[in-house]
Image (tube, helix red, strand yellow):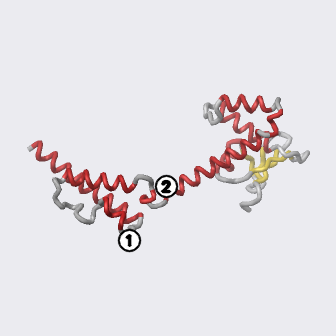
Amino acid sequence: MAGTPLLIKRYASRRLYNTETSDYVTLEDIAGFIRDGREVQIVDLKSGDDLTRQYLLQIIAEHESRGENVLPLDVLTDLVRSYTTQAQSVVPQFLAMSFEMLRDGQSKMIEGMTSPMSSMPGFEAMKAQQAAFMKAMTGGFAGPWGASGPTPDDDEDDDKPDAQSELDAIRTQLAAMQEQLSKMGGKKGG
């Protein structure tokens, strides 16, 4: 059922009828279906004409009129201009490719956020800076960060810790640093 579009029928009264749930829907309901990932097809009950494009444009116009500006003014101007020029044959493909690239970019960014932190550019340098900072803060003594803390030489090991153990180590280090800082603050006051 996920592959077939949700069929919405428009009655002569201009009311929109959801054929799956057998109830009337609004433009905002349709926008919600689309945001949830559903494909929607809106047809005129009497003529059978496909009205999907018309209603999608109406949804966009309503959002834009409420100040939810997604399309920059120059893009809207260029779209209007494309209806009166030879460029109209290129614009739809360009827009489709642009939105596809945007979707792919968002997917890759989300995937990158869920991958281990060690794959983040500059993570090794950040670990080295953190180790140097901790050494300076503790006066060089082996505190809770000791040999198990991150050091610049850790990247030479063949055994890479998994993301969860790295996060746990960072949390432990942050908690210890907060405790150390609160102790230092207490000595100042006393």
- From the viewer's side, name the closer residue of 124 and 180: 124
Q: Given the image, on which type of amino acid does mark 2 rest?
A: Met
Camera-near label (2 vs 1) is 1
Q: Which residue is mark 1?
A: 159
Residue 181 % position (x, y): 20, 49
26 relative to 50 in the view: left or right: left
Name which residue lies at 87% across and 47% down: 45
Q: Are marks 2 and 1 in contact (CB under 8 Å)?
A: no
Density class for disc 1 (Cα within 10 Å; few <14, some 14-19, many ≥20) is few
| Mark 2, secondary structure of its residue | helix
Task: Indicate whether 140 appears above or below 10.
Answer: below
Residue 79 % position (x, y): 74, 33
Mark number, residue 113: 2
Density class for disc 2 (Cα within 10 Å; few <14, some 14-19, many ≥20) is few
Name which residue lies at 39% across and 68% down: 160
Q: Given the image, on which type of amino acid does mark 1 rest?
A: Asp
Task: Indicate whether 179 appears above or below 99.
Answer: below
Q: Residue furthest left?
A: 190
- From the viewer's side, name the closer residue of 176 and 139: 139
| Mark 1, secondary structure of its residue | loop
Residue 84 % position (x, y): 82, 29
